Image: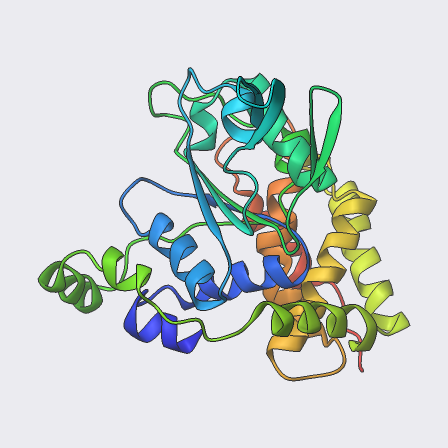
Amino acid sequence: MALLSEHYLQGKLPAIRLAMISLLAGGHLLLEDIPGLGKTTLALALARALGLSFGRIQCTSDLLPSDITGLSIFDQYESCFRFVPGPIFNHVVLADEINRAMPKTQSAMLEAMEEGRVTVDGTTYELPDPFLVIATQNPVEQVGTYPLPESQLDRFLVTTGLGYPPAEIEKTIIRGGSIREKVRQLAPLLGLDDLLAARQAIRERIYLSDRLVDYIYHLAAATRNHPLVHSGLSTRGAISLAGAARAAAYLEGREYVAPEDVKSVAGAVAAHRLILRTGSEGVRKQEVLASLLKELPVPLV
């Protein structure tokens, strides 16, 4: 991660870390930010560094589900239909500007994310393992967007943004120009077997104590009872938080989850799952979650 941050994605280490957590925990990543801040470069660099296949979907209002999943075409030489896989059949898939796609197309993509497979003309096809969707979402104020409903936002393990880089780093980026071609030539730092072994180690060896389970549960319960929150963190959201905390502990080189691991990922994992009450305009979900984390007693491990 440090290599990517220092040489290819300067100033983006937090986003790279969250992308790795999403991949290791078997989830997906949603980047909410304006265009031109390096979201595509991040997705491409991650795939190249890990030796994974990469696919890109440019979401537009006329994008069809078959443009994502693929379709069956008639092979006149073989006199039969042949399935042509779509870009979803890659290890890392960038769904650029997902909220510009029609809701039906969004649903097709999110179904693939949830099930890990797609069904075309009655035949089910398994998606690669590992499988990570990095979706980008433009601000809803921009023209031609279809905001993702809360039920679809819940399919993303992590939601974050890139933000503008610090002034000196941005000047360096401006001076050097685009690095997209350099990223395409990046040599893999890990192999597929290494990545799969890491995911297995996280599931089987990273210890989550009963005290940390209680801590995550009490945080979820606190979101449900907050006066500004209409719908708090669901059980699935709490499971996602535990999985992300395990991945964070693994990246820190520990075999157990500490409260700091939960805190470090809570905003990115839980905030987008909260639904605020009507009249809470001006209140940020991240602020609500931060206040709850501050009030909640931290367990000793």
In this view, the residue farthest toward the right is 210
Q: Where is residue 117 in the image (x, y as percent from the top left)?
A: 70, 38
Residue 179's quadrant in the figure?
bottom left
Query: How many numbered tags mark residues here?
Result: 0
Report if residue 39 is visible in the image: yes
The image quarter in which residue 66 lies: top right
| 219 vs 139, nearest the viewer | 139
Front-lying residue, 291 or 240: 240
Residue beneath the point at 64% across and 56% down = 130
Q: Position of residue 280 (x, y in %)?
A: 57, 31
* Quarter of the image with the N terminus in it: bottom left
Could one spot residue 276 in this view of the protein?
A: no
Residue 196, image x, y percentages: 67, 67
Seen in the image, is 172 located left or right of residue 119?
left
Q: Position of residue 270 (x, y in %)?
A: 65, 49
Give the residue drawn at x 53%, y 61%.
18
Quadrant location, the C terminus: bottom right
Q: Which colour scheme is used?
A: rainbow
Residue drawn at 74 percent across, 32 percent down? 124
Q: Residue at x 65, y 51 (%)?
A: 27
- Could you say which is closer to the camera, residue 221 or residue 65? 65
Residue, far left: 175
Q: In which quarter of the image is residue 127?
A: top right
293, 83: nearer the viewer: 83
- 218 vs 257: above or below: above
Residue lying at the far front in this picture: please name it: 77
